Amino acid sequence: MAGVSSCHLRHSSRAKRIRIELRPDRSILIVIPSGTREDQWLAFVLSKRQWIERTLQKSAYQPHGRRTGAVGFPSIINLFCMQQQYYIRHHAGTQNRATVVAETLALVCKNPSEKQLFQNLRRWLVARAREEFSARLDGISKTTGLKWSRLSIRGQKTRWGSCSAQGNLSLNFKMLFLPSDLVDHVLLHELVHTQEMNHSHRFWTLMKKFDPKCELHRAELRDAGQLLPGWAVKI
Ligand SMILES: [Zn+2]
């Protein structure tokens, strides 16, 4: 298929239907409910072929990251965690603000310098991260019984999240650019710390209980920094 870097299959006993996920490295993951025949999922994937090719052509799926040196102000942004993509427009105005209309994020800046634009974009991302991560924490809290109270959103260079001895969570808004399952993994990790402050055997037992793919997610998270767009390093 044009533009696809690689294709992975995952059989899942929990999946109810066939699902296709596009990843920022242009690979595709096909999740198949156990017992699905090969001709069934192949027919499904082929029926989605146009959608896959069209979506990959959008620039947000073009290779990005530090290595490509693409660090200018972006014209498109892909919140991979929510599978949402926005075109970015900007212009001068009387006050700094960010608004979304349909698929466009409009940034209004008093002095639209690159620095101001990045500050505006960062504020918007922090607000989106707060909404999204709080809702997800509530969901994980419901299924695991692990409670949380305070959340701060930061843009740490080297960590995705942390949890203080008082149970206050801190999460990195740049996780908006990571696949959804990795974000949930990090959120769960910090929630488990509200019970077990260290990385003891008991901590990992709890992690594996609530995230059966814990080891896979941990391994994927090690390289996840590469999934961030190049410009995210400097904001
Ligand atoms: Zn930890």
Image (spheres, rainbow, N blue to C red):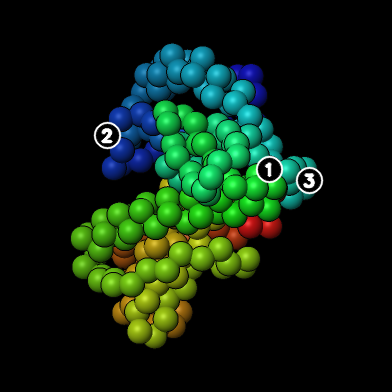
Where residue 234 sits, quadrant-wise, is bottom right
Mark 1 or 2, closer to the camera:
1
Q: Residue at x 45, y 79 (%)?
A: 199
Q: Which residue is depicted at the point 45% across and 18% down?
A: 48
Q: Where is residue 98 in the image (x, y as percent from the top left)?
A: 48, 44
Quarter of the image with the N terminus is top right
Task: Label 3: state its secondary structure.
Answer: loop
- Across and down, in percent, residue 9 comes to 48, 35
Mark 1: which amino acid? Phe
The residue at the point 65 percent across, 48 percent down is 111
Name the residue located 35 percent from the left edge and 84 percent from the top edge. Answer: 166
Q: Name the residue under label 2.
A: 16
Identify the residue at the far front of this view.
94
SS for dot 1: loop
Location of residue 5 with respect to 158 vertically, above or below: above
- Quote the CA–CA distance across marks 3 and 2: 41 Å
Quadrant into which the C terminus falls:
bottom right
Q: Is residue 56 above or below residue 192?
A: above
Q: Is residue 7 left or right of residue 234?
A: left
Q: Mark 3 points at which residue?
A: 69
Q: Do the residues labelled 1 and 2 touch (CB within 8 Å)?
A: no
Asked if residue 192 lies left or right of residue 5, the reply is left
Callout 3: CB less than 8 Å from ligand 1:
no
For disc 1, the marked residue is 73
